[in-house]
Image (tube, rainbow, N blue to C red):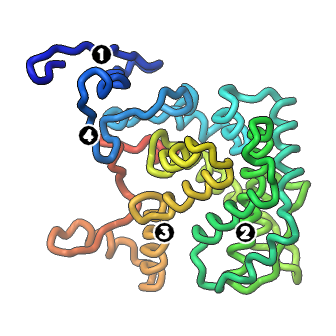
Amino acid sequence: MVLDGKEYEFPVVVGTEGEVAIDCGKLRAETGAITLDPGYGNTGSCTSTITFIDGERGILRYRGYPIQEVAEQASFEEVCYLLIYGHLPTRAELDGFRERLTQHSLIHESLKHFFEGFPPSAHPMMVLSAMVASLSAFYTGADGEGDVDLNIVRLLAKAKTIAALSYKKSVGQPFIYPRNDLSYTQDFLHMMFAVPTEPYEISPVLNRALNLLLILHADHEQNCSTSTVRMVGSSQANLFSAISAGISALWGPLHGGANQKVIEMLRMIEADGGDYEKYVNLAKDKDDPFRLMGFGHRVYKNFDPRARS
């Protein structure tokens, strides 16, 4: 590059998918200038082999595997293992990982009292963020290097329990404890919708849908919540605090909160008699302000590959 008549050279880095980046790590030291890139649209803050996205070609890969292939053939636990450890688990590795998730699905009984302080109308993302941050009070070694792997398992295992208890609080139903004989998604559904007065049969369709939903949202490169977690974690704050901050970022309507708009739209359509064609036509009408929520993504200029799953 040329700045104030002086020429500077910076190394070019080529990624695993052939993508090209200019390493400007020494830009300020050598030129006194910095880069300005609002929204990180042209900046990679790290090198990573976890997820690859090409929005122009509609590509999303987890550790090199196309998202369509992963979604069709894997369980959520397998995908977690793949993203965390870099390879698909063997049967023994998967069984061991599932057992650890089961062992850590209970939350400390004292944490149940925290829910009592929240009003029933409390937003579930606020509750989740607060409860995840509170986990650091119960696992005092959370910022120790040797505890990271264990705390990753704790987070995954307890997140569904906390989310289910948050829902039960909002509808005024008694809390349901985790069950060791159920898979991750089955246990989540059971804690969400079972009641003590009658048996609850887990729908295979709902279980498959939840498994698919969790897989498709498991990772999405350098988005707002991921960047938030990395920023907080860079101060060596404990893992629970960093993830809590990421959940708060995910809550925003321009990030994960957009999913709430989809649910609200579907409920509105249902309340209006379920005439979806009426609302499709409204969305096509250029003079009508109504918009169909959940269609399109700013990253994918061609199509969203997750839509094929």
Q: Quadrant of residue 187?
A: bottom right
Rounded to the nearest whole Å, what is the CA distance between mark 2 and mark 4? Answer: 42 Å
Question: What amino acid is found at the position of numbered circle 4 in the picture?
Answer: Leu
> Which class describes the residues within 10 Å of circle 2: few (<14), some (14-19), or many (20+)?
many
Q: Are marks 1 and 4 in contact (CB under 8 Å)?
A: no
- Which residue corresponds to mark 1? 10
- Which residue corresponds to mark 4? 36
Rounded to the nearest whole Å, what is the CA distance between mark 2 and mark 1? Answer: 50 Å
**In the figure, is residue 129 to the left or right of 88?**
left
Q: Earlier in the sequence, mark 2 or mark 1?
A: 1
- Which residue corresponds to mark 3? 260
The residue depicted at 40 percent of the width and 77 percent of the height is 275
**In the figure, is residue 268 to the left or right of 282?**
right
**In the figure, is residue 244 to the left or right of 138?**
left
Q: Earlier in the sequence, mark 2 or mark 4?
A: 4
Q: Earlier in the sequence, mark 2 or mark 3?
A: 2
Residue 37 location (% of width, % of height): 28, 41
**In the figure, is residue 10 to the left or right of 192?**
left
Element assignment for label 4: loop
Residue 19 location (% of width, % of height): 37, 22
Q: Quadrant of the N terminus?
A: top left
Element assignment for label 3: helix
> Which class describes the residues within 10 Å of circle 1: few (<14), some (14-19), or many (20+)?
few
- Which residue corresponds to mark 2? 164
Q: Nearer the viewer, residue 259 or 229?
A: 229
